[in-house]
Amino acid sequence: MTNDIKKEIISLAGPDLSLVEQALEANLTPNLDLVRQVAGHLLFAGGKRLRPLLMIHAARMCGFQTGQEIEFSTIFEYLHAATLLHDDVVDGSDKRRGKPCAHTLWDAPTVVLTGDFLLATALVIAARTKSPRVIEVIAQITADMSQGEIFQMEKKGNPDLTEDEYNEIIERKTAVLIQGACRTGAIVAKADQNEEIALKNYGWHLGMAFQMADDLLDYTATADQLGKNPGADMREGKLTLPLIYSLGKAGTQDREWMLAAMARPQFEPAEFQDLKERLMRLGGIEYTNNRARVHVQSARTALDIFPESPSKHLLELIADYAILRKV
Amino acid sequence: MTNDIKKEIISLAGPDLSLVEQALEANLTPNLDLVRQVAGHLLFAGGKRLRPLLMIHAARMCGFQTGQEIEFSTIFEYLHAATLLHDDVVDGSDKRRGKPCAHTLWDAPTVVLTGDFLLATALVIAARTKSPRVIEVIAQITADMSQGEIFQMEKKGNPDLTEDEYNEIIERKTAVLIQGACRTGAIVAKADQNEEIALKNYGWHLGMAFQMADDLLDYTATADQLGKNPGADMREGKLTLPLIYSLGKAGTQDREWMLAAMARPQFEPAEFQDLKERLMRLGGIEYTNNRARVHVQSARTALDIFPESPSKHLLELIADYAILRKV
C-alpha cells in the first residue's frame, strides 16, 4: 500500500517536480563557486521537494495556476535547505540524506554563511510575489524556527522533557515551515479567509505528523533506509515522543536502563535492539504512531471545504504518505 | 572640529535616536529569555545607530515624515546586529564595542540562531512597509553580505590581496547595508528615480568611506578608543588598504618584515609601533585617508540634487564625520 501511494504521488507530481528542479537550479546564482558547491551539496542531494509540492498544489486548489507557482514554490526548498545547513552545524551530525554533512566537508563559518545566502535567495523570490503577507509569513517562520532550535538545544539531554514541550519543539522546527508553504499557496492565489485557514490547519497537522513519523523512523528504520545511523536523536540527547512516552510509563528498572542508555555516546547493535523492544513494550512506538495518525486525519479533514480536484487528491495522498513512508 | 561635528549630529539627531532606542526594544519580542539575552548583549551595547539614522533622514529628505520612518529604520539595526553575530562566530574575535563577543559567552550555535532570529525580526518589520521593493533590497543585501564574508574568508592570510579585491570585500561587508538603508528611505518615501539613485550613490560612497576609516582606526586608534586591541584585522589575517598599499610600495626588506609580522599571532607594542611607522613611511595611511576623503566628497556631491533641508544637512555632516571620527 505504501508503494502504491508513493507511485501515485510520483505520477501525479512528476512533471511539476522536474520543473521545480529546473527552477531551483536557475534561481541559485551565487557569485562564488564555493557557495554554489556548499549550497548544491545539500540542495541537490535528492530531497523529496515536499514543501514546494505543497505550495504548488495549495495554490492550484485555490484556483491559481499561472505557472508562477513553480518559481514561488522554490522559496520553501531554499528556506528548508538554509535551516538544514544551520541545524547541521548546531547538531554536529555527520550524515544527512546518505551524504556527509556540509560542515564535515567545509568549515562551520562557510556553512553558516551559505545558509544565510540560501535564506537570501528565498527572500529574493518571495519579493517577486509582490505580497507583503508572504513576507510576513516567511519572517514569522524564520523567527519561530530559530527559536525552536534554541529551545531544543536548551532541553538537550534533559530526561524530563514533557510531551507538550516536545510538541512545541516539533511545531517550530518542522510544522511552521510546512504550514507556511501551504498557507503561502493560499495567499498567492488570493484565496478567501476560510480557504487560507483550512490550508494553515492542513499544513500544521501534516507537519506535526511528518515530524512524528521522522522521529519514529529514527528508531524503526535501518541505516540504509535513513541514509544515516538510526538512534541519532538519542545519541544527540534529543528526546522524542517514543522515548518520552515510554519513560512516563516505565518502572524503575526500565527507566534506569533507558537513562543509562541515553548517557552512552554510542550503542552496540544489540543494545539498540533492546531499547527498541522496550519502546515497543512500554507503548511509546504505538502511542507516537497513533498521535501521528490523528494528525493525518485532522489534516485530511481540514481539506473538506474544498471541492474534489487533482490537487486536493494529491494533498490527501501526501498526508497519508507522511506516516506510511519508510524514509 | 571633530567634536563640533559630533555635537551638531547629536543635537540634530538626538530626539530621533531616543525613539529608535524605544522601537528597537519594543520590536524585539523573542519567546525565549536566552534569545533576548544574546540579542540584547550586542544590540544594546551602545551602537551608534548610524544605519537607522540614515534611513530616517533619507526618507525625510524625500518628503516622508509620517513617524513610521522610525519603526522602519530599525530594520537596518536588526540586520546589522544579525550580521555582526554571524561574523563574530566566523572571525573568532574576542571583543566588540568594548564587551566580550557573544560567542565567548554563549556557544556558537546559540549565537548563530540568535542572528537568524534578528534577521527574522528585521523581515517582520520590512513586511510592514508593504513594499516588495524594500524586501528585494534587503534580500540582495543579505545575499551580498554572506558572500562578501565568504570571499573575505577565502582570502584570509593571502598577502597578494589586490586593492580591487579589497574594494569588493568592503563593498559587500559594509557599503551594501549602508546603501540599502539610504535607498530604502527613498523607496518608502516613494521618491522619484533620480532621488533614489542619488541616495543609492550617497550610501555607497559613505559606506566605502566608513569602512576605510574603520580599517585606518584599526591601526591608528588606541585600545581604549576602539573597545578592542588595535591590529585585530592583521592578527586575523585580514589585509586592509593601509597594508595592501604599503606592501605594493615596499622594497624587499620592508615587505619581508611585514609578511613576517602578518604571520605572528601576536604583537609586542613596540612591533606594532614599528609596523605603524612603516605604513606611514610607505604611504599606506595617507593613501587610504585620501581614498576615504574622495568617497566622502562623492557622497556629498550625490546629494546636490536635493534642496537644502535639516535632513540633508545631517546627511552631509554624517559623511564628514565618517572619516573624522576617532571610534
Image (cartoon, coloured by chain):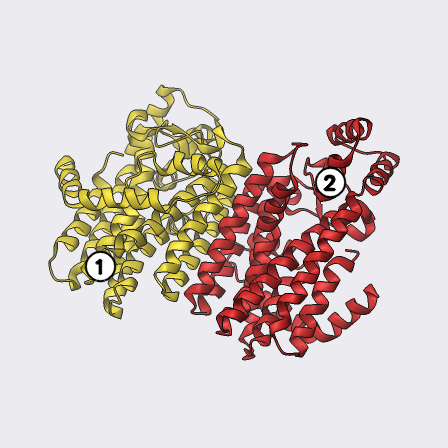
Chain colours: A yellow, B red
Chain of the residue on which disc 2 is drawn? B
The front one of A273 and B172 is B172
From the top left corner, tell me how far across and down residue A205 is, in percent: 28, 53
Q: Residue at x 51, y 41 (%)?
A: A112
**For the residues marked 1 and 2, what is the alpha-carbon distance in whole angstroms?**
55 Å
The circle drawn on residue B245 is: 2
Q: Quadrant of residue B270?
A: top right
Q: Position of residue A87 (x, y in %)?
A: 46, 41
Disc 1 marks which residue?
A66
Kind of residue at badge 2? Tyr
Front one among B155 and A133: B155
Residue A83: horizontal and vertical position, in percent? 43, 45
> Residue lying farthest right?
B270
Density class for disc 2 (Cα within 10 Å; few <14, some 14-19, many ≥20) is many
Q: Is residue A24 above or below residue B53?
A: above
Q: Amino acid at mark 1?
A: Thr
